[in-house]
């Protein structure tokens, strides 16, 4: 049985609550895909045990207690009542098994990132501070092979071996972001979607782009890498807003 139901399951309450809050905000910001897409978080040192959203649950309804606790080394029984979505297992178990630096994994089909992923050239040029954040910090997957069952998940995981590359622009598919924590990963996903929107809208004007030099783009990216506390403050404020609204995310 893949889903871990021991007392240790609910011991990860802070992590569960953080992750549940990001599902709620992804829905609020339109960065969800009906009852598809998945966020996961490793909770053991090896990175192989991870929390993930349950199968076919809308992001806007996910609560901390709903999250499944899976073991990447123990394939699921597909007919179990609490089995994960098979594409969630295929993509996220492969990454958690092969990329221990990817503590948190967020995969969406958010619209602007997906538009970028559908361009013949999916490179994100550094034309402002947000786009420069990702300068030389993403990989482009140009070998989409269909739904992310296990083979596709392992192929994607093989592209994330460089710890500096924390965004995968999934050609013809969407975006996948990794990070060291829920706050770190959510902040990166949020800003990548903003950057993709800025870039695509700039392309839509048809006017020449004001592209930053390589040196300034890298300097900006490094400064933002080193900027203290932003990701943690971002998530803390989002949780505070949900708490003020008496949201059920933390149940």
Image (cartoon, rainbow, N blue to C red):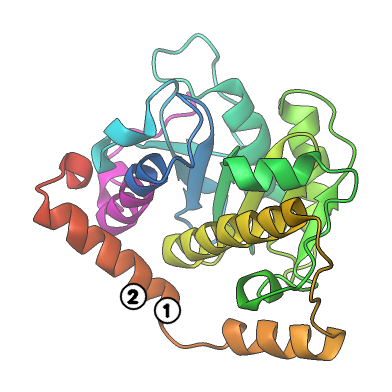
| Quadrant housing residue 145 | top right
Image quarter where the C terminus lies is top left
Q: Is 155 displayed left or right of 9 in the figure?
A: right
Q: Position of residue 210 (x, y in %)?
A: 79, 76
* Residue beneath the point at 41% across and 46% down: 29
- On residue 233, the disc is 2
Describe residue 119's horizontal placement relative to residue 233 as left or right: right
Above or below, 158 relative to 68: below
Residue 11 within the segment the image draws in magenta: yes
Q: Tell me the tag on residue 12.
A: none
Name the residue located 48 percent from the left edge and 51 percent from the top edge: 41
Residue 13 lies, with reference to residue 120, above or below; the image says: below
Q: Position of residue 102 (x, y in %)?
A: 62, 59
Residue 203 lies in the magenta stretch = no
Q: Secondary structure at mark 1?
A: helix
Q: Is residue 16 visible?
A: yes
Q: Alpha-carbon neighbours of circle 2 within 10 Å: few (<14), some, or many (≥20)?
A: few
* Residue at x-position 54% and y-position 67%: 180
Give how far apart the Cα atoms at labels 1 and 2 are: 5 Å
Q: Position of residue 48 (x, y in %)?
A: 57, 49
Asked if residue 102 shows in the view, the reply is: no
Vertical placement of residue 232 versus 228, above or below: above
Structural crowding at the residue carrying mark 1, measured as other residues with C-alpha within 10 Å and reported as few (<14), some (14–19) or many (≥20): some
Disc marking residue 230: 1
Do callouts 1 and 2 mark residues in contact (Cβ within 8 Å)? Answer: yes
Residue nearest the observer in this picture, 130 or 183: 130
Q: Which residues are magenta?
A: 1-22
Q: Is residue 227 above or below residue 241?
A: below
Q: Secondary structure at mark 2?
A: helix
Residue at (15, 44) in percent of width and height: 247
């Amino acid at each position: 049985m893949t889903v871990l139901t021991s007392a240790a399951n609910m011991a990860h309450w802070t992590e569960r609550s953080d992750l549940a809050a990001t599902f709620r905000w992804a829905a609020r910001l339109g960065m969800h895909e009906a009852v598809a897409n998945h966020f996961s978080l490793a909770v053991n040192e090896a990175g192989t045990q991870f929390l993930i959203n349950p199968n076919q649950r809308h992001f806007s309804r996910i609560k901390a207690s709903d999250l499944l606790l899976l073991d990447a080394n123990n394939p699921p029984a597909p007919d179990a009542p609490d089995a994960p979505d098979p594409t969630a297992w295929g993509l996220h178990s492969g990454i958690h098994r092969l990329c221990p630096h990817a503590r948190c994994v967020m995969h969406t089909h958010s619209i602007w990132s997906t538009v970028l992923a559908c361009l013949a050239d999916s490179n994100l040029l550094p034309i402002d501070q947000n786009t420069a954040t990702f300068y030389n910090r993403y990989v482009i997957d140009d070998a989409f092979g269909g739904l992310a069952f296990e083979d596709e998940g392992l192929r994607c995981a093989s592209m994330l071996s460089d710890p500096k590359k924390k965004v995968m622009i999934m050609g013809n598919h969407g975006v996948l972001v990794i990070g060291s924590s829920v706050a770190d990963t959510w902040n990166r996903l949020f800003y990548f979607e903003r950057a993709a929107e800025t870039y695509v809208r700039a392309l839509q004007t048809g006017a020449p782009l004001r592209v930053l030099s390589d040196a300034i783009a890298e300097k900006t990216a490094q400064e933002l890498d080193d900027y203290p506390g932003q990701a943690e403050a971002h998530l803390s404020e989002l949780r505070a807003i949900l708490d003020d609204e008496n949201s059920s995310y933390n149940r």
